[in-house]
Every structure is written in C-alpha cells, then in structure tokens.
Image (cartoon, rainbow, N blue to C red):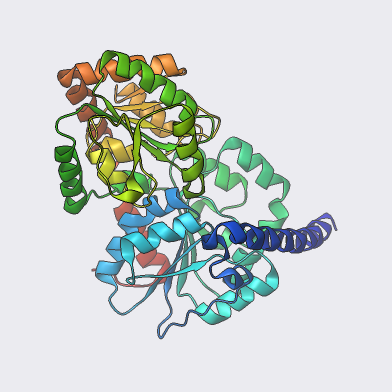
Amino acid sequence: MLSFVLKLLYQLLIHVAAGVMFIATALRGVRDPQYRDRLPERLGFTQLQFSNSPIWIHAASVGEVQAALPLIRRLLSNLEQRPILVTTTTPTGAARVHTVFAQQVKHAFLPYDTVGAVHRFLRRTQPHCFIIMETELWPNLLQACVTRAVPVMLVSARISAKTASRYRFARSLFAHTFPNIFVAAQTLEDQQRFLALGALPERTQVTGNLKFDLEVAESTLAAGREIKQSLHARPVWIAASTHAGEEEKVLQAHRHVLLHRPDALLILVPRHPQRFMQVAQLLDMQRFNYVARIGRQLPMAKHAVWLIDTVGELMSFYAASDVAFVGGSLVSIGGHNLLEPAALGLPVLSGPSVFNAPEIANLMIAQQALHQVDTSDALAEAVIKLLDSPDQRSAVGNAAQRVVAQGRGALASVLKLIQQEARINLP
C-alpha cells in the first residue's frame, strides 16, 4: 500500500514539477536563446528519426559530457552502421557535444520524467540500449526502458552517502528497474551503495572512472602552444570553471601575484556562459585591465586578465598555462574536473570544496599532485611559489600526469560491458 501511494505521489509531483520547469525554462529563454531552443524536446517531442536504432548515451551537463568523450569517440570509430544519440539536460552540455562532434552524433534534450514525455521520446528514437553517465535515476524513464527491453547501463556510476540515503527513501520507485540495470561503479563504496538500493550483485562491478581515460588531442596541444607563443613568455595561471563568489577571491589573489610578478597573466574561465557579462562587469568594477576572448583580441602587455567568454576551448587554455586552479572549490559547489589539467602535466590547485569527486582529490593529494588552499592569500602564495620554480612545476605536473595514467582502464571495461549487455560487436 505504501509503495502504491509513493508511486502515485511521484506521478503527481513530477507532473507539477515538469510544468513549473517548462515555464521557467521558457521564461529564461526570453533572456537566453539557448534555453528556448528545441523547448518541445523537454516534453518528448523530438524531431530526430533514425534508420537504425541508436546507442543512446545520457550525459547531464558539461562534466558528464567530458567524461563520456573517450567512450563516444571509441563507439564512433567501431560502429559505422549504428547511430549515436547523446542527450543532455543543460544547453552548455549540448554546446559541448556540438563543439566536439558536430554532425557525427545526434543530440536531444532529455525529456522530463513524465509518463507521456518519456513514451513519446522512446517511440520516436527506438534506442538499442541506454548508457547513463554517473548518476541520473528517473523512475518513469528507467521503467519505460525496462518495459521495452532496452538494456540500461549506469557507467562510471557514483553516488554519495547523502544521495543514497535520499534514494533509499524512495526505493520502491525503483523496485522493478534496479534488478534490470547493470551498474559499472567507480569505486567499491559506490558499488555497495547501489547494492543497498536494490541492484543485483551479479549485475554490478567496479570498473573505475572514465574521466581517467580522457584523451588529449594533438590539435588541443597545438592550439595551446600557439596561444602560449602569442603571450611572449609571460607567466600564466588559469582559474577554470569559476562560480559567483569565487571570481572575487581569484582576483584578490591575482592582485597579490601581480605585486610579485607584474607581468603575470590570469586566464579567467567562468563555468557558465550566462555569467560572462557579470564577470566582465566585476572586472570593470575592480579596475582590472583585461581583454575578452570573444573579440579574438590577444592579451597585450598591459592586460592583467584574459576573460574567456567563449565555450569549448578550456583544454587549449589549460595547455597554454603554467599553473591551474580548478574552480567550484573555493565556494560550496564541490569542485570540477581535476584530471583535465593533470593530464596536461600542470600543477593543480583547488579549494577545500571537492565533494563532487573526493576520491580523485584525495588520490592527487596523496601523490603530491594537488595542493589545496582555503583563502585568496593562500592561493596567491601557491601560484607565486609555482611560477617562481620551474623545477617544482615540473615535479608536481609529472606527478599529476602519473595519477591520470595509473587510473586509466575504465574505458576497456565499459566497452566490454556494452558488448555483453547490448549484444553488439566492438572490434
């Protein structure tokens, strides 16, 4: 009886929530066109059609898309006859998919988890299998896939103790779906939490984190070298994926850096495109001499900050930098991808808020590949120390690259799982 009531309550709440989200997205689209783009897809009205059932990969936003890139590239190189569909929930995720793959894959926004929206979407797309990156558990969507005998795989799966406790409260919503999902967990702790939610032991395994399998394209390295050359040997540090309340701390740190190294350049990369103008106004208010990327003007000697107000170039700017600070960590966001600068051999700095990927942060700290700071003064001190010491930069950067190299291997396990569950041949 309790299970029935919970399911009924969920259906009522998700319909109300979907209506509110649809209106909110439409209103946001008045100011930001990317939010009104393909709005009917949120209700399952996709215009996509496939001659062959696609491999469907869901990556909620930019971070999950980045993690999925090696997997998507490998599938593209081995599945010439089967299309690939990538869904995201955010426009920034969609932009990243388009930037990397253009027309090689199809993209749609994930429909809201109402019965009607889900069934409309599945009727049109007819997926061969469904691969979910990390953690996106929607009861109606998963139930519809199981009912249609669409194999579902949760890969690079992670779930915190706090999130798991919330899902346990609604465990009956997944009672008929979890036993049919294969969970490829990042860690043993993640595996145990999914087992507690109802996953079957024989349908779970620890495969590791796909983020370690990221591939740095030669074109990215070449672009980084070109940017670096244009900066005429200036000392460069980058603050990437920053958030509101964090840019202020970064800029305060940069003022201290400039007192010690007047020619230092800060490459500032806000996390969300809709905040680009806000960050530019902050730079104006704080009287920083800066140049914006969107104008394609390169920084001159007088510019202390280069504001990157474009999307999809972060790795190239990492490759052009000497030191990397990864944002979302000096504010309570949980931090962003530490492995991207590490893969390029950069010494990596972050704040204390790294709860999005504590295992990676702890591993890098243990290998002396990551230094955490908790104030703008501490950030400035760490940046100055690294800029002043090429040998230390090299040692820390090499340690960071070793962490990435040692963590590789999830991709091979996931590809084997896809062959097994989706019954497709991957040469």
Residue 402 located left or right of residue 163: left
Residue 53 located left or right of residue 409: right
Instruction: Name which quarter of the figure residue 15 lies in.
Output: bottom right
Q: At x 38% / y 72%, what residue is drawn?
A: 423
Asked if 52 appears above or below 341 in the picture, the reply is: below
Q: Nearer the viewer, residue 414 or 284?
A: 284
In the rendered image, which quarter contains the N terminus? bottom right
Instruction: Name which quarter of the figure residue 161 lies in.
Output: top right
Asked if 82 appears above or below 212 in the picture, the reply is: below
Q: At x 29% / y 45%, what residue is drawn?
A: 315
Q: Nearer the viewer, residue 19 or 199?
A: 19
Asked if 415 appears above or below 322 in the picture, the reply is: below
Q: Position of residue 351 (x, y in %)?
A: 45, 25
Residue 109 located left or right of residue 141: left
Q: Position of residue 422 (x, y in %)?
A: 41, 70
Asked if 97 appears above or below 365 in the picture, the reply is: below
Instruction: Name which quarter of the figure residue 27 lies in.
Output: bottom right
Q: Is residue 176 visible?
A: no
